[in-house]
Image: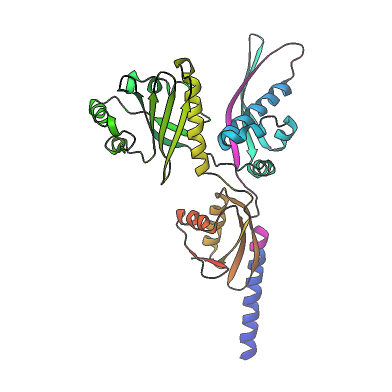
Amino acid sequence: MKSKILFFRSNIYLIILILASFKIFFSTTFLYAETFDIKNIEISKKFDINFQKSDVLDEGFKIAFQNLILNIANSNDQNKLKNLSLSNIKTTINNFSIKEEKFVDNIYYVNLDVSFNKKKIFQLFERKNIFPSLPKKKKVLFIPIIIDEGKKDLILFSENIFFKNWLIENDNKNQLIYVLPTEDLDDLQIIKSKYNFLEEYDFKEIIDKYSLENYIISLIFKNDNNLRVLSKIKLSNQMILDNQIYKNYRNEKLFETIENLKNIYEDYWKKENQINTSIKLPLIIAINIFDDKKIENFENIIKKFDLVSSLNVSKMDNEKIYYKVIFNGTPKLFIQEMRKFGHELDIKNKIWILQ
């Protein structure tokens, strides 16, 4: 009887080893599995004796790369990649597709989508000592108020040149999507009644009408010579105050000033989503080896993590499968990301267990 039990146990263990080997063979190993996709790049070139289609595509790759940089690098770092050679740009491209091409009046037109390898882009940024940001669109309420210090007056809504022109050059490469308030007489009266303490006023009565958690209030102080812009910026849980001074300001510089302010606001948002690729945090996650659904779900979830640089099975035993995860962030951030997908981790010991 004892020999039969031993035989049974040895066969069960053999089955477990086979299953474990099966999981090793089919386990996921990846590096930044997703791509950065830049769509609708439009290029045109005159069709003459020197025409080469490859030249047009190369120009499209350069434009797509610059658009990507505008999306994921702050304004101070963008110049570090401005003159990157075409050959280096091409090494970061996974694939591209021509959506449309046509000839009209001896002009060749093409529309491209370009996919960049996320791993290679992050490696490039790391070599240049640049921290990239994950591209995330964010709706934000924007309220610009001009304070004419000479006339001691407030200029709002359609009478305000910043309000009227803010969305004219609305660049799709920007991550912040601006929502301007509607012209409301009640709001006008509320703001004007706060003239003497606008810098301390929280604008809650107006902000609450728009059901937006994020907002930027720009107080634009105007005098004969200079423009001072005090911005109250709420893009996360904290409030940021930004103060900019534009000396010898004239209305001819309006669009230049708007572009500058937008870049400042974009940089604050990019900082919220910044990745430090130099952080290589190794984590060991254990999962019940017989829970195929949980194992499959875990692998699929990890593929969606932009901050995971690699995932592989490190070992197995007759109870658990152990994954080694390299995470470009803090343990706290990893736990938060897992919770977003409804998963808790037992982190009491060095090896974390997926609940």
Q: In this view, does 206 lie to the left or right of 67?
A: left
Does residue 32 belong to the magenta stretch?
A: yes
Side of 354 relative to 206 (left or right): right
The colour scheme used here is rainbow
Q: Position of residue 137 (x, y in %)?
A: 47, 37
Q: Is residue 170 visible?
A: no
* Residue 295 forms part of the magenta stretch: no
Which residue sits furthest right? 49
Outermost residue toward the bottom? 1
Q: What stretch is highlighted in magenta?
A: 23-51
The spot of residue 198 in percent (x, y) is: 31, 33
Quadrant location of the N terminus in the rendered image: bottom right
| Residue nearest the viewer, comparing 97 with 338 | 338
Q: How many numbered marks appear?
A: 0
- Residue at 31 percent across and 26 percent down: it is 182
The residue positioned farthest toward the top in the image shown: 105
Residue 174: % across, % down: 51, 31
* Along the viewing direction, whichever of 115 and 3 lies nearer the viewer: 115
Which residue is at the front of the view, 115 or 156? Answer: 156
In which quadrant of the rendered view does residue 25 lie?
bottom right
Q: Can residue 77 be seen in this snapshot?
A: yes
Residue 298: name its quadrant: bottom right
Depth check: 226 or 265 in front? 226
Whether residue 314 is situated above or below residue 253 in the rendered picture: below
**Residue 7 falls in which quadrant of the image?**
bottom right
Give the image location of residue 227, x and y in percent: 43, 24
Write the residue at 57% across / 36% down.
74
